[in-house]
Image: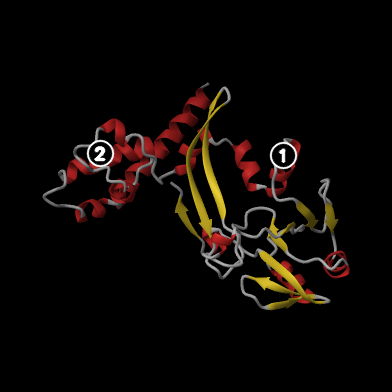
Amino acid sequence: PFQNAMRNYYRVTRRYFGVFLNCWRNRRKHELQDGADMPPRLWRMSEQFALQALNGVTANDYYELGLYARDMPWSAKREYVGQFDLRRLYSPFNNMAYAMVTTDKILFHLLAQALAIRDVPIVALLGAEGFGTPWRMLRTREDLQAFLVGEQRENLFFKVDRGSFGKGALSLGERVGADSWIELPSGRTVTFDEVAAHLDVHSLPGDDPRWIVQDRITAHPELAKVIAGVTPTLRVMTLNRGKGEVEVTGAVMRFGDGDTPADNSGTGGVVFLVD
């Protein structure tokens, strides 16, 4: 019990020291916001410090969200969650079991399959080792060549199974030769050797680089007018309140930038709120 108490004391002390240090470093932001229509600076700094300790609201969050407003009640300000130490606030209602499913694409597809949830089917997995999964394995360059060239495959999408944030994704369109395809969204022609080299270069570090191969999904014609060759995705945020009650809290539409085949913000994509 004593060790647990000391561990909790250390954790709490470290967190509040981090809050204090962050607020001290951002005091200049409060000074820049001084004005006749603003509450006194000491009031704003004290309020933002309390909000950061409770809800992770940084100085940037405080002003961008308009939490300095005199007529906003404290209870309303406490409804906002800021960017400071976000993992601590995020984990209580998004535990690691859910995070693993959303991070590991293979695990996600296995779970969707078990629950009979429709998703974009996996055509094959590319990697040196077996995964013990129901999908076809492509373990060597020869396997990949037999799959792409020998079977005359086209309209495929390659992505790393986890942690790449869209980087390195490859989208192949129609075949234009025995061993060549149109790469999307660039529209240039790529050969099998170039495809194999791309997959090798963009594999994540490790002994067993793993790629998921799926059929390429085309966007609705109206959405394709925004960015051609890159399929946008709709992301719906939900809150599980327990006992079968699920609330939709928001939704966004992600679009790629037209330079890469993915719509991730890490590769230049943009996000729009959905009404």
In the rendered image, residue 204, in percent from the top left (x then y), is placed at: 68, 60
Mark 2 element type: helix
Mark 1 surroundings: few (<14), some (14-19) or many (≥20) residues within 10 A: few
Residue 223 against residue 273 in the figure, above or below: below
Identify the residue position indicated by label 1 in the image: 111
Looking at the rendered structure, the kind of residue marked 1 is Leu
Judging depth in this view, the residue of 115 and 226 nearest the camera is 226
Identify the residue position indicated by label 2 in the image: 47
User: Could you give the CA–CA distance between mark 2 and mark 1, rounded to whole angstroms?
Assistant: 44 Å
Please tell me which residue is depicted at 76% across the width and 52% down the height of the picture.
122
In the rendered image, residue 239, in percent from the top left (x then y), is placed at: 51, 34
Extreme residue in the front direction: 221
Between disc 2 and disc 1, the foreground one is 1
Q: Is residue 16 left or right of residue 11?
A: left
Looking at the rendered structure, the kind of residue marked 2 is Glu
In the rendered image, residue 143, in percent from the top left (x then y), is placed at: 87, 64
Q: Quadrant of residue 172?
A: bottom right
Q: Is residue 263 left or right of residue 31?
A: right
Please tell me which residue is depicted at 38% across the width and 37% down the height of the picture.
55
In the rendered image, residue 64, in percent from the top left (x then y), is placed at: 31, 50
